Amino acid sequence: MIEKEYLKKLAGKLMFDMNDEEYETLQKEFDVILKNMDRIAQIPDLKNVTPMTFPYVHETAKLREDKVEEDVVLSVGNVLKNSKHNVHDQVKLPKVVE
Amino acid sequence: MKTIKSYRKELDDGKVTSEELFQEARKKILENKEINAYVTVLEEKEEQEGNSILKGIPYGLKDNFSTKGILTTASSNILKDYVPVYDATVYKKLKASGAVLLGKTTMDELAMGGTGTTGHTGVVRNPLDPSRLIGGSSAGSCASVVAGITPFAIGSDTGDSVRKPASYGGVVGFKPTYGRISRYGLFAFASSMDHVAYFTNTTEDAAILTDILKGPDKMDMTTLEDDGKKYTETLENDVTGRKLFYFKDVTNPSYYQDKKDPILTETLTKFHETIEKIKTLGIEVEEVDFDKNLLTAIYPAYMTISCAEATSNNANLTGIQFGPRGEGDTPDEIMMDARTKGFSELIKRRFILGSYILQKENQEKLFLNAGRVRRLIVDKMTELFQTYDGLIMPASGGIAPHFEDASDALSDAYLILENHMAIGNFGGFPSITIPSGIVHQMPVAINITGRVLEDDVVLNIAHQIEKKLNFQKIKEEARCEK
């Protein structure tokens, strides 16, 4: 079974934590998931296949003009609208450097 | 059952006003409160901008589409107070068509789930039988159409998040070719597989929506150039000589002899009865022996790719620029607290899986191999599409499960029958679910997946099959028996 401490480390990398019970559920779930993942490894000659990262070759893809689209640039007011602590048109956070 | 056209006629004949339709839909939401289809219901009808067949008709929009000034939560606590400051292209286009937004529909949190049970406002129930789930992640959108609240609703589909619930609710679920419809303003889950998709009562309504929503968008560089086609105009094309295939063995009831699941057996028997009816349309349907190792690898490959992509796509949910601010003395502590409180357990488990997959020591074995499997499957499908116009399969191995039902996540029946529709996301293929019969008083459905760019062919074939099957009649008969 996968170590709880290892899972905790992974959660930490993603900036969250879980309680003990939740880690135990995850440990059990990992058992099933890893068994399923093994099915991938059973497929022969995978090494020579290039991994696919996009559904199909998109021949019409083109770069857009390198210019600012004024209508989609958010105003400072809009950027800050959903932030809870703002000071002087900036998002406020605790000091990082003392 | 009311279609977009029947709503249009009522409006044009002056039998009803758009305001009355809007208020009636609001009332239906209250009458169906236990279904929990909506997170947010608009109190007042928005100003209508445009004119099209959709003008004045109410619809539901999944709560992961950005709507300026309207709460958009993705059914997650981490976005429970988020009010977007821009519009998704899909929403803009619907506004420009005159369609009336009724509200934002409940979903599986951040679209990561297939049950409709993980949203922060509670579970979504199946309007046909509230003791059963409707499926997800686009649960509320599906329920809205099934309950007759709106004639159509927009969702998103990364694995089968529209096409599976459609099956559980006895409605049509269509996911066009990847790039056909702009994803701008759709909260990203797994960008290489995310699609805009929708629920309707008929294939014709699905074609109507596609005609309105498709087209290039400068805000989404993956959108396709317009193909200049009107999909509503080719629905009646002759389908004689079209060829479909289905996967051998896994669709055969006797393949699961040891399982003794009467619903599975009946669903697969019904599937073959449906195939026989389809053949009378002049469509050839053949079985194909597809590599079983590849089929059982669909689900793990899907989980690997989607969780890995989701892990990075959701890294912006920190509670700092939006969402509830966490507590703590440092930026890290604040973020940690917001994310610990903001994500549900299921989401955290999926993120940890994504993180595991992306660790240096696992990347080759898991992440890259999943991408390799994806390519093998898509290449094989593309090869088969040289002979066949589409893949036809049961959309699920059964009917909408009860909330307490658990699936055997390691069985072939689960791995293949419940997950094969992700093929449509791997390759961006257009894919449609249409209801095909009744099992134990609940609907079952078929799914048809076609060649990339051939949305018109998929809709045409599905429309002709829909007419042949006459599902509405089947549904009425089943109701009478009930």
Image (cartoon, coloured by chain):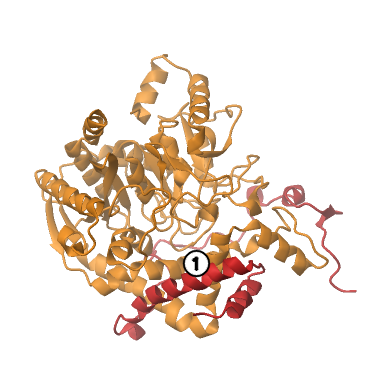
**Residue sitting at the far top:** B14
Label 1 residue SS:
helix
Relative placement, left or right, of B361 versus A93 is: left
Amino acid identity at mark 1: Cys
Picture quadrant where residue B441 is located: top left
Task: Tell me what hue chain B is rendered in.
Answer: orange
Relative placement, left or right, of A15 versus B329 is: left
Instruction: Work out whether residue B386 can be spotted.
Output: no
> Can you give x and y, in whole percent of width and height, for residue B52 in the image?
43, 30
- Foreground residue among A61 and B149: B149
Q: Is residue B218 above or below residue B409?
A: above
Instruction: Work out whether residue B10 can be spotted.
Output: yes
The residue that disc 1 covers is B307
The letter of the red chain is A
Quadrant of the drawing holding the C terminus of chain B:
top left
> Can you give x and y, in whole percent of width and height, for residue B425 in the image?
38, 60
Identify the residue at horizontal 76%, vertical 67% (top origin).
Answer: B333
